[in-house]
Structure formats: structure tokens, C-alpha cells
Image (cartoon, rainbow, N blue to C red):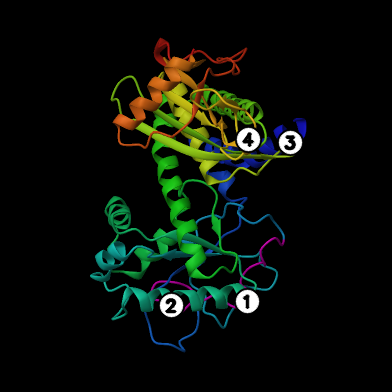
Amino acid sequence: MAAMRESVRESMREPVREMLREAAGAAGARSLRGRRRVLVLTGRKRGSGPGAGSGGSGAGPGGAAPPGGGRPPGARADDGAGGGARSSRGGRARGAPPQPVAVALAVAAGDFAGLARYGLFGGFSHRDYLRQAEEQLTALYRQGLEVHLRVLEADDFEDYCEALGLDPRMPAARVAYAGDPDLAGEPFVYAGQRLAELLPVLMDDHRARVRMSVACAALLDAVGDDPAGQRRLAAVMRYVTSVYLALAEGAGEGCHLLTLRCHGPEDGEELTSAVDVCVEEGQLYPAGRDTEAFCVTLAAGVASGGAGAVLLHGDPSVGGRSVPAPGGGSEDPASGAARARPPVRGWALAGGRLRPMTAHEVFDELADDAARGLPFPPGVDPLPGFPLPGFPPPGFPAPRDGGAPLG
């Protein structure tokens, strides 16, 4: 499993670095990232050309590197507001670095209706807007431009404008929102998909991003923003990454589901996260946005001294223990008298520390989830959790204000 461990460490490395940059407020680090131009897809007449939407820049033929060229897709880009004033004719200056294009897309009909009152979409219906958006995205992609997508959400856009003192009707507000450098996590890179395939994936990414933003705020509040807090943040992230690796290694082959719920000791705000953990021939699939959200949420629970639970639902197709049918009978699977029950293991989070649950506690946690409205998984086999790495690690900085949760 050494190769699996290294694959996760590699895929988590940049998100952890990014959180450290944000916690430190290292504005200078952002200058190392490439700028991106911004584009809000707005309703307009056909034939006006891709990238000509109100408030967005055009994307010229030489405006950005093709996906995978120069730097890996998904690499974080800087604030696009300063680089969004070029027309589609001008392209980029000779010798300038590639510029990804940031695109804000109104996915949900409710958000589209809420934003239409600001004049963002002209007289287009949501269906026509999405059809036009698909044409624009396809044109940008075929030009070899790297396109970073985000969801244009009505409430979030209005809050963003209010916080920065921007008029939501003005192009500058839409440009700033599309290229917001403080958006949590790495960019969602468009890969030429049809919208029917793209939109569900983009919405899942958006929901994970929202969960990560909430958890990141709780995490940074718990560790503090002083130099010692930065060291605590690094230590907590190293710890939760090691926990994620141990959970994946213990889960074994197949696609498993990890769920997490936790809340802090003071305000009691509940944070939740879920991620599929897929292992094939000893290799762990690369970490995505859900993995980032899970690790940041767990880090917030650990750092704040929170309480909660982690459940590992085994892959049903792999199977667990073979259980004879009631009344006895053959355990030959062909006979139908025995069935393999997928295992569910659990760990309790208390005072910011994880400990293995007993099988009875796992069952009780599943029952509590059902009482909260989640479906009780049928035919599962509650099992004790296995040991996980301990915390705090050696040399961990003392908690701020002399409190106990971090030390």
C-alpha cells in the first residue's frame, strides 16, 4: 500500500499548501500563480462571439494554455479581475504567461430567476441560456483555452457584492465574482463535456466547495492566525491526511463510503461530509474535492475539540462476512441460503480525539442517523473500528489561550 499512500499525499499536497497560504495571508505567494481572465456567461444574441458577455473578457485564440500544458489542470489561478479587460481580437501579449479563463455559470433555475432581475441574462430563458452557455464553453475549449468553472449562486453572489460594496447590476461585480481568488479549493477545470454530463458534476463540486468553505472557517478559527496557529494548522492537516490514508488502507479493495458528522464544543454548529474511497489493486483513486472537504471538516472537528462520528461503509459489491439464512441451510451462495453483509465500521470523535467504536456503538450511530432522516442501510454488518493514528503528534505546538482541544 506504499504506492497508495504516496498517491494520496501527492493529491492532497497542493490543497494543504493552499490552506496554509490562506491562513498566513501570504499575499506574495499569490503572485506565483498565473492570472486568469474572467467571463460571466450572459444571454445575448447569437453570432456575437464567445467571451463577449457583459462584464467578462473575451478569450482570444492565444489567451491560455491548453489543458495539461505548462502546469497541471486544476492548478490554482490568481485573481482574474485584473486580467479581464482584453478583447477577443487582442489575445495575450507576446511572451505573457498562459491565462486560464474563469467562468461563472447559473446552473439552477432558481438562481437564474433570482439573478435575472439584475439584468445578467437579457431576455433569455434558462433553457436558452444554458444552450448558449454550452456553445460558448465549447468554443473556448476548442480554442485551446483552459476554462475554470464555478456556480453562479444568487444568494452567494448578493452576499459577495454586499461584503465588497459592489453593485450586482454592474459588470465589475460579475467579473470579480467569477475570478474570486478566495474561492475554496482548486479550480473546476472544464474538459469539453456536454452540459447534460457537466452540470450534475459541477453541482456536486459546488456543494463540496461550500462544505469546505464552512469547515475551513471553523478550522482557521480554532487554530488561530498567529505563527503558532500556522504550525498547528500544518500539524492538524498532516494528522487528518494520515487518518484518511489509514481508513483507505483498512477499507481494502472496492469503492467504500466515508461519512463524517461533527460539531464544535461551543456553538454546536454541525459539520458534515462524505466521500467515496476507491481502492483498486492496492492503488487509491486520486483525491478530489470531496476528499478535500472531508479532510478539512475532520480537521475542524479535531482542532476545535469537537464531537461526532466517522463511519466507513464497505463496498456492497465486495461483500463482507457470509451469513447463513434464518433457519440454517447451505452457505453456498448459489443456493441463496447465505448472503454476504457489507461491513460498517465506526469511530467516535470526542474532545477532538478519534477512538474506535464497538459494534454496538456503530449500530447505535446508524440508528441515530436514521432518526435524523438518513436511510438505514439494509443488511449491513456493524463491526468495531480499527486503530487509527494518534493525535497530537510529537512536537505539536501548545494550544492558544492555554486551552485543551489542540494539545
Task: Choose the circle earlier in sequence order: 1 or 2.
Answer: 2
Q: CA distance from mark 2 to mark 4?
A: 50 Å
| Residue at which label 4 appears | 333
Give me the residue at 35% from left, 23% from top.
264
The number of callouts visible is 4
Task: Choose the circle earlier in sequence order: 3 or 2.
Answer: 2
Task: Choose the circle earlier in sequence order: 3 or 1.
Answer: 1
Foreground pick, 99 / 276: 276
Foreground pick, 401 / 350: 350
The type of residue carrying mark 4 is: Pro
Q: CA distance from mark 1 to mark 2?
A: 19 Å
Give me the residue at 35% from left, 70% from top.
171
Relative horizontal placement of residue 301, taking residue 12 as reference (left or right): left
Give me the residue at 74% from left, 30% from top.
1
Task: Choose the circle earlier in sequence order: 1 or 4.
Answer: 1
- Residue 73: % across, % down: 64, 57
Q: Residues within 10 Å of mark 3 (few under 14, many from 20)?
A: some
- Quarter where residue 241 is shown: top right
Relative horizontal placement of residue 1, taking residue 49 as reference (left or right): right
Q: Residues within 10 Å of mark 1 (few under 14, many from 20)?
A: some
Q: CA distance from mark 1 to mark 4?
A: 55 Å
Asked if labels 4 and 2 touch by Cβ distance under 8 angstroms, the answer is no
Q: Main secondary structure of the magenta part?
A: loop
Please, what secondary structure does the residue beneath circle 1 have? loop
- Residue 215: % across, % down: 42, 35
The magenta stretch is 51-69
The type of residue carrying mark 3 is: Gly
Q: Which is more foreground, mark 3 or mark 2? A: 3
Give me the residue at 55% from left, 62% from top.
36
- Quarter where residue 287 is shown: top right
Q: Which mark is residue 131?
A: 2
Please, what secondary structure does the residue beneath circle 4 have? helix
